[in-house]
Image: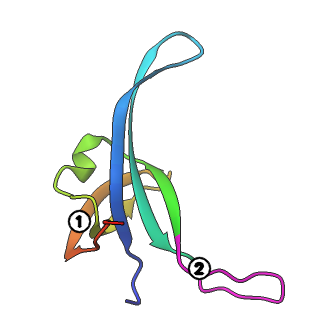
Amino acid sequence: MDEKYYIFVGCAEGQFETENHEKRAYANMFVLSPVSTYASDDYRAKGFKAEKLKCLNAGVWQDLTPGELCTLYFDDKKTVMLATSKGEMISLEP
């Protein structure tokens, strides 16, 4: 797989309290993605990295199931605006 993909593993939504005691909504999704293939004398990595990503709202992941491969679309602030399924599942069973 040459194009960037993510494995959706979970999500969280709710409210947090700001320093001004205001309630603000949040929506986060949790994904696994392949690590960079970059290598140097000082750096090597392989496998996947776990990421918590800020989402526009909870609707971003509404059609995804944990273990599903997806493509993510970001805005200029790196917020996930849209997540689409690639139609493949990865088993998350131990």
Q: Which residues are magenta?
A: 37-48
Tell me the residue at 33%/61% (across/down).
Answer: 8
Which percent across, then down, holds residue 80?
38, 54
Q: Residue furthest front?
A: 94
Q: Indicate the secondary structure of the residue bearing disc 1.
A: strand
Which percent across, then down, holds residue 39?
71, 88
Tell me the residue at 41%/53% (across/down).
Answer: 30
Q: Where 38 sits versus 8, above or below? A: below
| Front residue (pair 32, 58) | 32
Tell me the residue at 77%/88% (across/down).
Answer: 40
Q: How far is disc 1 from disc 2 in space, using C-alphas?
A: 22 Å
Dot 1 crowding, Cα within 10 Å, few <14, some 14–19, many 20+: some
Q: Where 50 sits versus 14, above or below? A: below
Which percent across, then down, holds residue 88?
21, 77
Q: Is residue 20 left or right of residue 76?
A: right
Q: Is residue 36 left or right of residue 39?
A: left
Question: Disc 1 designates what residue?
Answer: 84
Tell me the residue at 34%/46% (across/down).
Answer: 11
- What is the three-letter code of the residue carrying label 2? Ser
